[in-house]
Amino acid sequence: MNNHRITGAGLALKPTPIAANTFDTTWQADLALPAPDQLEFVEIAAEQWLGLGGIWGQRLQEATERWPSVCLSGSLSLGGPGRLDMQVVKQLGAFMHKHQMTMLSEALGWSDDDTPLFTCLPIPATQDALQWTADRITQVQDALGLPVGIRNVSHHAVPPMSAMNEAEFIHELVNKTGCNVHLDITALAENSHRFGFDALAFLKALPMKRVNYVRLGGSDAASTDAPLNQVAWRLLPAVLSHVHPAVPVCVDDLAQLKRWSDCALKTPTKALVC
């Protein structure tokens, strides 16, 4: 039974079946297969699973009864200019309650302007946007009765009129709302490469003591993403050395799961003065 404790190594659970004769290193929702030895929790992307019934709904229920689970979301558009969709907040709350989830990881961006944009845009880091986003995070936390984990995302443009960088923006949001930080190392690697900033300096500017979840997305086997995924893995020891040892790490790939376990065993921990 799910004991609600999120720690150690986790995998994103996907509802997509593996096609015949197709090589796929991700772990699908086929619980007839043996679970990886290192697996301690599963990550559920709400947009992929909400409303699924039949065999997939049954497999999801079995998985969340067997392992603690994290709800990954990108649907609240925390920094978006449109109204906060409280119906979506209620749906997420009901989904999390059904599957005994106590951790929500929400994308820090805007993906809706009273209609879905089907992308996640960066938030202009102005003082007005800071207060706007903080107010919306507070609304979500009050509605769900738990702290939200705001997650940095990969994006393709530098927002205009920014008064601070993204790490400073995140730090201020934590100060204003008491939310947590969910660190996507792959997104950080992509953005640092795309926009030419120092990823290690970004980490030092974050409130690392509030990081309570780490992601390593993508797959080393994907040819187009492999170089940036290698950059993300090189950042991982720096991240692990500056967060609490119990902070969970989630990956998308079976090979990465073992690689993370090996890396974590070799990485010393130390306190970071923020």
Image (cartoon, grey):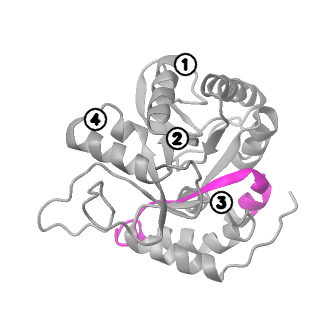
User: Is 166 colored magenta in this rendering?
Assistant: no
Q: Which numbered disc, 1 or 4, marks the residue closer to the eye? A: 4
Sooner in the amino-acid sequence: mark 4 or mark 3: 4
Residue 215 % position (x, y): 54, 58
Residue 203 % position (x, y): 72, 60
Q: Describe the element under mark 2 as helix, strand or loop.
A: loop
Is residue 58 shown above or below 246?
A: above
**Closer to us: 46 or 85:** 46
Residue placed under numbered mark 1 in the picture: 82
Q: Which mark is residue 52?
A: 4
Q: Number of callouts in the render?
A: 4
Residue placed under numbered mark 2 in the picture: 101
Sooner in the amino-acid sequence: mark 4 or mark 2: 4
Sooner in the amino-acid sequence: mark 1 or mark 4: 4
Q: Residues within 10 Å of mark 1 (few under 14, many from 20)?
A: some
**Closer to us: 93 or 195:** 93
Query: Is there a contact, CB below 8 Å, between mark 2 and mark 1?
Result: no
Residue located farthest toward the right when viewing the structure as drawn: 273
The three-letter amino acid code for the residue at tag 2 is Met
The three-letter amino acid code for the residue at tag 4 is Leu
Q: What is the spatial separation of the Cα atoms under label 2 and label 1, in whole angstroms? A: 27 Å
Q: Which numbered disc, 2 or 3, marks the residue closer to the eye? A: 2
